[in-house]
Amino acid sequence: MKSISLTRFLIEEQREHQHLDADLRLLIEVVARACKAISIAVGKGALGGVLGSAQSENIQGEVQKKLDVLSNDILLEANEWGGHLAAIASEEMDLPHAIPHRYPKGEYLLLFDPLDGSSNIDVNVSVGTIFSVLRCPDGVTEPTAEDFLQPGTRQLAAGYAVYGPSTILVLTTGAGVYSFTLDREVGSFVLTGRNLRIPEETQEFAINMSNQRHWEAPMQRYIGELLAGKTGPRGKDFNMRWVASMVADVHRILTRGGIFIYPRDLKDPSKPGRLRLMYEANPMAFIVEQAGGAATTGRERLMEVMPTDLHQRVPVFLGSKKEVERATAFHLAGG
Ligand code: AFP
């Protein structure tokens, strides 16, 4: 069978679907090109001098790795001059990045987590890039943080690249989920998965169990049932996986099902969760829903959360529909 490049796929999508115009197509291609550059940097590891800390902190107060900073720079540099964007927001930057005046501006807003799972870089475990695309509100020429505060339902495209044994780009523009594997020799992303579907049921869960003592009662109840296995109320054994790179955990769920949970944590009541709504939760929720799964905060649909802050955190429950619905029902019942 003839291989289909990302470029060809996008051009054909543009012909068939109204929702993909030339600028959005260009945007996705540029992000994919930046992901190739990040993939090369990640792949060089110690030989590229990219491991270790950058000796700086991001807006979240987290120590930045050299690759966090490099990946952010690669994505900014690739995207600011093409004329397709109105502004860019990144998990690694306090405020949105304005498009320099010397370049034309477009109508899209791009958000990204340039290198998700960065605690895994130095130990040679999969990391990734997550991105989301929104439309700049009408009439806004100099977008500020407020202009990005749109619910996930308004996303026009979302995707991630996972830098694992192979580099895979997963993409949705609201018409199903497609995956592309990087052909390293040719330097091109090739379509390798069409209309990906997450099985509705699963026997696998992903959670950081070390936080268990800080969880709310509904979480304790839900996980308790899974851990009880065959002889418990669920009548079956569950397996557990936790990579600690959301991209890798979500990619596994997209491939073979499962539920991913980062719940609210009473360890620090000021933080309603660990993961960022705009850079991690919303794009992954869009992908998961497009693949037939579900994504909630434990209490409401993730993509309907009205953001109040560019860097806000949320609890995340996503993956196989029936499991997410069960965990959510426990939370709504309050026990
Ligand atoms: P970083 O990109 O800041 O390393 O965070 C990764 C992440 O947000 C997400 O990818 C993981 O699921 C989660 O953190 C892992 O968190 P724990 O270290 O608490 O397990």
Image (spheres, rainbow, N blue to C red):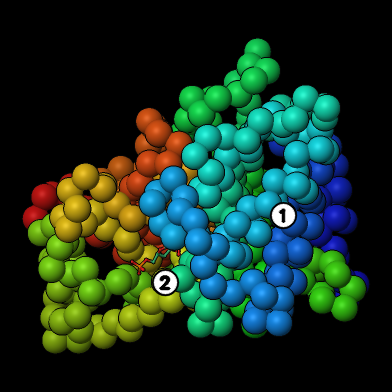
The earlier-in-sequence mark between 2 and 1 is 1
Residue at disc 2, secondary structure: loop
Rate crowding at label 1 as few (under 14), some (14 to 19) or many (20 or more) other CA atoms within 10 Å.
some
Residue at mark 2 to residue at mark 1: CA–CA distance: 23 Å
Image disc number at residue 172? none
Q: Quadrant of ligand 1?
A: bottom left
Q: Residue lying at the far top in this picture: please name it.
A: 139
Q: Which amino acid is tagged 2?
A: Ala
Relative to 20, say whether 46 is above or below: below
> Pointer 2: what residue?
244
Asked whether residue 85 appears in the rendered view, the answer is yes
Q: Is mark 2 within 8 Å of ligand 1?
A: yes
Amino acid type indicated by mark 1: Ile
Residue 290 shows up from this direction:
no
Quadrant of the rendering where the C terminus is positioned: bottom left
Residue annotated with mark 1: 74
Q: Is residue 300 left or right of residue 304?
A: left
Q: Nearer the viewer, residue 31 or 37?
A: 37
| 18 with respect to 162 (left or right) | right
